[in-house]
Amino acid sequence: MALKPAPEPASAPAAREVVNDFSITVATINGTGSQTSNLTILRALFRMGIPVSGKNIFPSNIQGLPTWYTIRVNKHGFLARRDEHEIVIAMNPATVHDDMNKVVPGGVFLYADHIRPQGLREDVIAYSMPVNRLARESGAPPRLRDYVANMVYVGVLAYLLGIDLEAIRAALDFHFRGKAKAVELNDSVVRAAFRWAEEHLEKRDPYRVAPMEATQGLILSDGNTAAALGALFGGVQFVSWYPITPSTDLAETLEHYLRRYRVRPDGKHTFAVIQAEDELAAINMAIGAGWAGLRAMTATSGPGLSLMTEAIGLAYYAEVPVVVWDVQRVGPSTGLPTRTQQGDILFIHFASHGDTEHILLFPANINEAFEFGWRAFDIAERLQAPVFVMSDLDLGMNHWMGQPFAYPDQDMDRGKVLWEEDLERWEQEKGVPWGRYLDVDGDGIPYRTVMGNRRPGASYFTRGTGHDEYARYTEDPEVWHRMVHRIKKKYRLGRKYLPRPVEDGPGTEVGIIAYGTTDAAMPEARYLLEHKGIATDYLRIRALPFHDEVGDFLARHRAVYVVEANRDGQMAMLLRMHYPQWATRIHSVARTDGLPLTATFIADSIAGQEG
Amino acid sequence: MALKPAPEPASAPAAREVVNDFSITVATINGTGSQTSNLTILRALFRMGIPVSGKNIFPSNIQGLPTWYTIRVNKHGFLARRDEHEIVIAMNPATVHDDMNKVVPGGVFLYADHIRPQGLREDVIAYSMPVNRLARESGAPPRLRDYVANMVYVGVLAYLLGIDLEAIRAALDFHFRGKAKAVELNDSVVRAAFRWAEEHLEKRDPYRVAPMEATQGLILSDGNTAAALGALFGGVQFVSWYPITPSTDLAETLEHYLRRYRVRPDGKHTFAVIQAEDELAAINMAIGAGWAGLRAMTATSGPGLSLMTEAIGLAYYAEVPVVVWDVQRVGPSTGLPTRTQQGDILFIHFASHGDTEHILLFPANINEAFEFGWRAFDIAERLQAPVFVMSDLDLGMNHWMGQPFAYPDQDMDRGKVLWEEDLERWEQEKGVPWGRYLDVDGDGIPYRTVMGNRRPGASYFTRGTGHDEYARYTEDPEVWHRMVHRIKKKYRLGRKYLPRPVEDGPGTEVGIIAYGTTDAAMPEARYLLEHKGIATDYLRIRALPFHDEVGDFLARHRAVYVVEANRDGQMAMLLRMHYPQWATRIHSVARTDGLPLTATFIADSIAGQEG
Amino acid sequence: MARTNAIGLTKADYKGAPTTLCQGCGHNSILSQIIAALFEMNVRPEDVVKFSGIGCSSKAPTYMLSRSFGFNGLHGRMPALATGALVADITLKGIGMSGDGDTASIGMGHFKHVLRRNLPLVYIVANNGVYGLTKGQFAPTAEKGLTLKRHGTNPYMPVDVCMEALAGGATFVARSFAGDPKQLKALIKAAFHHNGLAVIDVVSPCVTFNNEPSAHYSYGWARDHEAPLHRLDFIPPEEEILLDKPMEPGERRVIRLHDGSVVVLEQVDRDYDPTDRFAAMRALEESYRREVLLTGLLYIETEGRENLFQVLNLPEDKPLNRMTQEELRPAASVLEEINAKDMFHGADVRVNGR
Amino acid sequence: MARTNAIGLTKADYKGAPTTLCQGCGHNSILSQIIAALFEMNVRPEDVVKFSGIGCSSKAPTYMLSRSFGFNGLHGRMPALATGALVADITLKGIGMSGDGDTASIGMGHFKHVLRRNLPLVYIVANNGVYGLTKGQFAPTAEKGLTLKRHGTNPYMPVDVCMEALAGGATFVARSFAGDPKQLKALIKAAFHHNGLAVIDVVSPCVTFNNEPSAHYSYGWARDHEAPLHRLDFIPPEEEILLDKPMEPGERRVIRLHDGSVVVLEQVDRDYDPTDRFAAMRALEESYRREVLLTGLLYIETEGRENLFQVLNLPEDKPLNRMTQEELRPAASVLEEINAKDMFHGADVRVNGR
Ligand SMILES: Cc1ncc(C[n+]2csc(CCOP(=O)(O)OP(=O)(O)O)c2C)c(N)n1
Ligand SMILES: Cc1ncc(C[n+]2csc(CCOP(=O)(O)OP(=O)(O)O)c2C)c(N)n1
Ligand code: SF4
Ligand code: SF4
Ligand SMILES: [Mg+2]
Ligand SMILES: [Mg+2]
């Protein structure tokens, strides 16, 4: 999504005007409805054509605790999180001083007058807003006061930055889906606040926005919605899930859309969604459904994944297609349920006892969340295997720009399923009686029938215990050996069905590897590195097991930095394991604190190691 | 346990006498009580001073299916499984032909006359035994007939091989714990069969045994018993478990001994054993107990481990000591429940979502099973961490020679626990208020209090969510980062508490690394390699994370072969991951089919790769 | 020649692989009765699908109905596995076989929740009071005080599978005994025709680990203490004519199932109303005090409760798993609509005034 | 100055960290009543230990008793966690706090099994019919037909925590309402003195996600439909004197607990015998039909059932977790005995004839 970086440094000196290049952070209390205001600002800027991203830093709590929303505005399209906050809007008395201290020198501190910070910093430009008074004057009913209070800062900010009031109006229209009364009320508060600011504030800061054309044709979405839509267009038939942040929205949004678009004219559903009693049930249900020929999925996060471990092994060894979305949050253990991490890679790749090596997909943006949403089913059914889509809270719950979602460019690939007539034909063609685990094609992928196929000989008995090519129980050592190596072959040859890595770069000797949401920081990080004199090539991994391109990339570079949001450098470890010949050139750039990585951290780490 | 190998090749040509160097396999039906007979043979040979090992290849079934027991007799002390069977005793009509085909050319095929093999092989020496008749004549009551029938082959074999009847008598005495009637009955059957053989069989085969002194002072045990005894002498206080083969015996034997040796004169128990409702409960109970200051453990196998995954992450991050025995069986999934594997290494090392790197111990023999049985508690309590003892079915359920168990040479290390008075003193000494997760010693290990400590300030609230040094809930990014890196430090520095690797070898350029039961095949494998002109050094890993010696060993050798009983070469993968600088010299020798690795396989694989 | 049923099949057509359970194991008898019931009801094996967890009881489905699909899943997870699968083709009838360990220990949660969902499934608990496959530890259904040679004396109160099913809102709850083939077969038939989840808790002795005559799950004790609530007969819809013979009130009860089949209960001691959930609980509670093995159809709810397929609003004309891309992937126009209306859009010319 | 109790503590000594639950959340009221009960009973906070699972309800223990140890474990696993821990020091009293999702959904199996074991633990289910912390999905206890804006209408029959406890053999089963502080406090006191597992299912409204007046777990509905079985009073052993005032039979019931404390039940509508398990089930069943929220002490079993500590034969003179190496590690002579007698030995001179 990044535009061609301009030659000037990312942030300009405070003295002159700063246009379309800063971050706004709103500090509020959760449960007070500030999300609407924040989204309104985000959308209005986006509508003005300016690249934006929005990130919600919220507590694992329902009401009353501090929460922050950060909007990054960047004309180059550098949209990763930054540590610097140019504009802070303080609405929460509990954190007002910390919030003030966050502002960069020369930045803006905009605060609700009733939260009364004790002593303002000299090096920031402070503005106070009569939030409660304006809310009162809005004429909103008392129960909406808190809510409306948040619209005040939208109006004041609009004045200070020059946000188009029409764009705000458009954002409100969208948000309230045209409910005129709500739009009117909010819009009037925004305009009143704007007018108040016009009259009472003297603009002393350098920040402002100016229309661009950089978002034309783009949309804003969160990754969970994108994933849900992807699954919808993937023809998902069965969803079993158990609530857990940050994956809950994915399942709920999916059910919402299924009820909208997958009910037949006679009222019957072409899907089933079951809120299970726990994740053990959720995954076992999905495995039952996948086995029975449905496109089946579940969505969860770390703790749920951990509970699914045993069943994952069953799906691996009994060769049952099933899609599992892991919207990663911070672990180990319950960890930080509302913060982001890329920490489940190693665990899931090797999940369950015995030898396994699972397929992981790494969507990096909302368009890939959508695409992998449907493609994961094709892969799972083609390879008769569990497929893990490794999203994270940052992608899943934050707001990202992207292309409109693209309709699948391939028909659904149901894999090697044999129905009644197919089976007949198959046996004639192949000249052997069908066996569930026979590798007749040499690709390690057997053919399967599914429950309901009434042809004689179609049925078989599935189990997680040792079985031969005809699915018969056996403890024969040779057969066990043969079966697990056939499965290994299936995974090895099956890599061709997985999304290939994406590469970019001039062909230098320093490489960077990243995956998933860490990609968001890469254009800026590489830009910063270039300015430090380090030109880099970039490869983004989109799936495990690795494609050959990954090895080639390692081979071509003197040093390769693997960037990821976890403590141990999990992908770097995997790369070393798989590419012993290049192991020494693999360097880890890893960090986890619950927040998305910043470009500065990445660039500094790499420069430091290169230096 | 291996003796200095003699210069002659392992098996001599069939023409001349073969003394104390062959394998006997008994093919029976499970549930018919042949285990007593097999153990009797094993023990009698052992009592004669001859090195032996006994391996049971049994089905996951209670009654009626084929089962095999193989005794390896080897004067050099080479006691690993072999693929060659010199003597096969066939008692099972269902497998008689397969069993006959197992015999090496020139070997012995001893069969019960009623199972009537159709056509005997020309190249084996066959003897038939009137098993039913002798059993009938034994005067044993009809319900014991089947059972007694198995004693017949003991007697016949004793005659053929020259097994000392007194040694057999001693074995029976031991087995029946002196119950005279049972001993008498069995002994008389053995003697009758012996006499019958004397009268009716003409010995035509070269195999025989001769007394040695190689087992003087040694004992025979299985690893599960050894582990249970180790835990007993480790002062285990709490055991929660759920039945699963092959770990069940460990828990049951432990309870047996606890009831024998840990009941106070007033009848009160100094332990608690709870058969839990599942493995989720078992591990959470053990974590509760470990948290509360008990030496707590559970024992399970693959599927149970998989279910414990979430709780493992909790113990890691909340820093709760707990010991988990994984008696490995064949996975993935339910796999082969009664076969052996070293397949859970990667999974457990990285178990649970988020960054983890668990401590694994690898006992290779019954003495280490005992030792790690007590030492694991010291480690868990010292490091406030879950500790996994990676046994396997081969060690746990098979019969091994070893030294008598050695009483712990160290006092129990309860780690940094503060009781009422300690806390007082601690705060004075350290000059800070105590905090559960404060790293005052710089070793990453905090001090803990436990429930029941009534001193003001002693209590704290434990959780799997983010917490600071004082165990207070927090979502602060810096604190999260600090805590997980402090934990990482604890594991890094804590390696010194783990059993160091064991090394052996002349100092050549080819190294071998193995761990756990694969060790049993190493003396013979290295002997075979030496005879192929490949001198080897050997390092046996006894714990994860790795000690520095492992890296040094890699550094010192041109090529290092990592031998293990799994499909993917899991330890080799870990070594590559941790030692990128030596990654290319690490070669994997891995195989899994449910049976223990043979020395021939290992030697041939290494020789092949050395090529 | 072997006898054939109305659809031309012999009993052999309902068989599975040769059993590897112990000789005399109760589970083998249950298999025989399932086979007999399906044979007599003229059910095509292809119309049945088998599920199980882990245990001797859960291995059992291998030994019947080899013409049916089957899935021997994970320990305790059979209800979840079956739920996911059965949704795929609601024309198939599911049989789930589980053990007391599998259901009442590790699987307790799923058992409770599959009841709530009223999944159409014949759920058989082959109950022997022990964990057979792991060599005879106490299962949670073992009676308090049961003493086993290798495991001492059980100090805990037993779980009563039927009481749990009743408390959990099951719509069909029965108890039977592997040594009472006639009753068991009738119950299996009725369960097969029930329009929701049917629990049959079968005392199924483990001859190897828990068959001392004093043990409540032994053949001996069960035979001596069985107290059937009624004599049972199942009459399929097409044979309803049989009911025409005169009936005296109080002697029999006739329960009509959703598909027109009928269960006839002939009174034994007293008239028992199996549509009264509360009476069922009382009968169970009394059976503890009287130390008897109460068997029969404890409870049935024939109307009022939707089954899971109804709740999910699944089509009846076509199984979900036979649906094609046309039915499953919404048209491109739908995505266009979503992109246009549900997503917020970037710069547009009007706003930027260009 | 703040009032102190008999052991010199003020209410503040029973407090925890400031609550972060929503204003008006039922769980906050439960916390207040626990605090009040312990304060009034003169229990030292150091003698109590807190456990919970995951959920708003499970966060709650943070907000009370900061002088007690506590462990906020994993979702659904509180019963297991508490079992392991409480064994370590049986002089401590455990309070477990859980939610309807935590107990009746993911934790159902452990709930059932901790009942069987009769672990001495006050087990409070803060029941709001929804998953609060994950934003208001239906919990398994939600009434059938409950409609929530974001989640549609619940099609499944509810799990009744009290019925489950009764069916599972609990020895103390009560239901209460966060809006009835007096009754709740009395029940907490009684539970605290019960010699085994005490389940209190508390209707504890989620003001954020499930408080529409038509919803059964709302303050409005619960207040309007509460039907207490009795008025309850708890009298600690040392105040037994209070009971001396004359009693008329039929008006009150007096239940004596193992430690000499007493629960006095004053009849409301009819005389209710809480020692009759079966009556409890009937009362519950009727409450469904009458659509009322039945509260009070549904069932108590004061004798006859051993608790887990008794079953395990734990010492009373010293907590397990204070035992030393001398008590825990058998002497070297024991190992010698084992080595000598239980292990089979290799070559001995006699046999080899040397
Ligand atoms: C997760 C897991 N834990 C434990 C086991 C071991 N296991 C196999 S069967 C069984 C008990 C079966 O008992 P039950 O369900 O009563 O069946 P039965 O053998 O008595 O018929 C257990 C614990 C397993 N296979 N998986
Ligand atoms: C294994 C696991 N699955 C899911 C979650 C997410 N989760 C957190 S709280 C909760 C539900 C809590 O509901 P309840 O027990 O009713 O408590 P309440 O918030 O309503 O008080 C869930 C599902 C989790 N933390 N762990
Ligand atoms: S062990 Fe028991 S349950 Fe298992 S097959 Fe044998 S008799 Fe049946
Ligand atoms: S969301 Fe509901 S349950 Fe959670 S704190 Fe708020 S009111 Fe209580
Ligand atoms: Mg059983
Ligand atoms: Mg709840």
Image (cartoon, coloured by chain):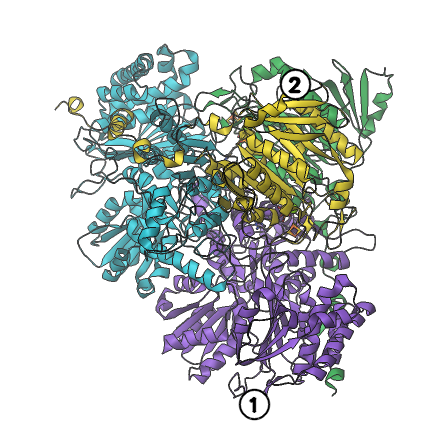
Chain colours: A purple, B cyan, C green, D yellow
Residue type beneath disc 1: Arg
Which structural element holds mark 2?
Answer: helix
Disc 2 C-beta below 8 A from ligand 5 = no
Residue that mark 2 sits on: C287
Residue type beneath disc 2: Ser
Is residue B513 visible in this depiction of the protein? Answer: yes
Left or right of D310 in this view: A246: right
Mark 1 neighbour density, 10 Å: few (under 14) some (14–19) many (20 or more)? few
Labels 2 and 1 in the same subunit: no
Q: Is residue B582 above or below residue A200?
A: above
Residue B298 location, quadrant:
top left
Residue in the foreground of this view, choosing between B485 and C78:
B485
Residue A54 location, quadrant:
bottom right
Distance (Cα) linking label 2 and label 1: 89 Å
Is residue A179 visible in this depiction of the protein? Answer: no
Residue in the foreground of this view, choosing between B115 and D295:
D295
Query: Which chain is disc 1 placed on?
Result: A
Nearer to us: label 2 or label 1: 1
Residue B404 location, quadrant:
top left
Residue drawn at the location 81% of the way across and 21% of the way down:
C253
Instruction: Tell me where residue D346 appears, x and y as whole percent.
Output: 22, 29
Residue in the foreground of this view, choosing between C163 and D14:
D14
Residue A16 numbered tag: 1
Q: Is residue A70 above or below residue A315?
A: below
Query: Which chain is disc 2 placed on?
Result: C
Residue B573 numbered tag: none
Left or right of C265 in this view: B196: left
- In the picture, which quadrant includes the C terminus of chain C? bottom right
